[in-house]
Structures are given as structure tokens and as C-alpha cells.
Amino acid sequence: MSFHLRPPSVDKGVSAFLWAFGFFLYIWLGQLALGIGKGSAFILGAVAGGAIFLFIRLYGEGGARRPRRD
């Protein structure tokens, strides 16, 4: 008996959150390294992470689909 090994299916929202969290950390730590204040860096990173989450959630994996015209 043979079978294919494949990774588990990951929901689009989980994938979008992981990407957004990774980019948030990258932006936040980068701003701290540049000497920007902790509060400003956190807020800017959080806003950018939220925008990245929405973008990936809406347009990730093939993008938004147009409704069919009948």
C-alpha cells in the first residue's frame, strides 16, 4: 500500500497572521535598532502588520475572485 506524504493544510487566515506577525517583528526591531522610540516603533509596526494581514488575507493564494456574470 502506497500513500503520499504531504504537509497539513493551513487556513488562509493563519498563514496571513504568521506573515503579518513576522513582518511586524522585522519592522519593530528594525526601528528599535535605528533608535526610534519604543512606543512609536510598536504603533507603526502594528499598523503595518495589520495592513499586511489584510492584504495577504484578501489577495493571497490567487487573489480575490471576481463574481461570475450569468
Image (cartoon, grey):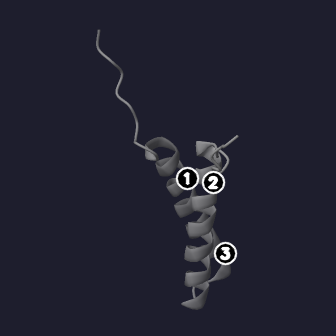
Q: Is residue 6 above or below residue 37?
A: above
Residue at 65%, 51% (x, y): give it.
7
Look at the numbered discs 1 and 2 and tell me whether their residues touch, using CB distance below 8 Å. yes
Q: Which residue is mark 2?
A: 17
Q: Which residue is mark 3?
A: 39
Residue at 51%, 55% (x, y): give it.
51
Neighbour class for label 3 at 10 Å: few (<14), some, many (≥20)?
few
Secondary structure beneath disc 1?
helix
- Between marks 1 and 2, how big is the CA–CA gap? 6 Å
Q: Is residue 34 above or below residue 12?
A: below
Q: Residue furthest right?
A: 1
Eye-nearest disc, 2 or 3: 2
Q: Amino acid at mark 3?
A: Gly
**Residue 56, percent across and down?**
49, 50
Q: Amino acid at mark 2?
A: Phe
Q: Quadrant of residue 62?
A: top left
Look at the numbered discs 2 and 3 and tell me whether their residues touch, using CB distance below 8 Å. no
**Residue 68, percent across and down?**
33, 18
Q: Nearer the viewer, residue 60 or 43?
A: 60
Residue at 29%, 14% (x, y): give it.
69
Q: Is residue 38 above or below residue 50?
A: below
Q: Quadrant of residue 39?
A: bottom right
- Earlier in the chain: of badge 3 and badge 1, it is 3
**59 with respect to 25 (left or right):** left
Q: Which residue is mark 1?
A: 53
Eye-nearest disc, 3 or 1: 1
Q: Quadrant of the N terminus?
A: top right
- Earlier in the chain: of badge 1 and badge 2, it is 2
